[in-house]
Image: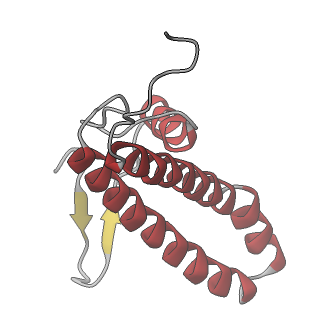
Amino acid sequence: MNEGGPEEDSDPEHVVTRAPDREAAQEAALDAVEPDRLLEGEDEHSVYVDDAIHWSKVYAELLDFKRSLLTVADQEVAAMDDHAASEVRQTDLKVLNAEAARFERRLRFWQQRTDTLSRPPSTEPEQGRR
């Protein structure tokens, strides 16, 4: 048996994925919606414009992906039984929307950081200095 991986039954088109244990599932859910969570390797204090551009692209891709999932989910929910649709709205859609909101905030942060790092340094003397 493959621990934690997909298991195949007699139907090759049907793959059963083993559910994570309760603690792992809870940790993953909390990580997914943690509003201030950074991605691995992300340094919001980087002074390099290339880093800011990179992370802007990463978050734009993640946001596009999450929005496409939300579009499909909305279409599927519309065709579901009321009880099933209610469950999806109260769980899955809340998580997807929270993740999309986090990606959108991080994208705005990196876009602003790109703008800031792209500006030439000011050559005007600071006010109050003589």
Looking at the picture, does residue 81 appear above or below residue 107? below
Q: What is the count of numbered marks?
A: 0
The image's colour scheme reads: secondary structure
Q: Residue at the spot x=31%, y=79% of the render?
A: 14
The residue sitting at the front extreme is 130
Residue 77 x %, y % = 70, 80
Q: Is residue 127 left or right of residue 80?
A: left
Q: Residue at the spot x=32%, y=44% of the render?
A: 120
| Res 38 → quadrant | top left
Who is closer to the viewer here, 59 or 34? Answer: 59
Q: Is residue 86 left or right of residue 48?
A: right
Who is closer to the viewer here, 41 or 130? Answer: 130
The residue sitting at the right extreme is 82
Who is closer to the viewer here, 33 or 120? Answer: 120
Q: Residue at the spot x=45%, y=24% of the render?
A: 125
Residue 67 x %, y % = 54, 72
Q: Residue at the spot x=51%, y=11% of the render?
A: 129
**Can residue 17 be seen here?**
no
Residue 86 x %, y % = 80, 67
| Res 97 → quadrant | bottom right
Looking at the picture, does residue 62 appear above or below residue 122? below
Q: Is residue 65 left or right of residue 11?
A: right
**Can residue 65 be seen here?**
yes
Residue 70 x %, y % = 59, 73
Q: Is residue 58 left or right of residue 62?
A: left
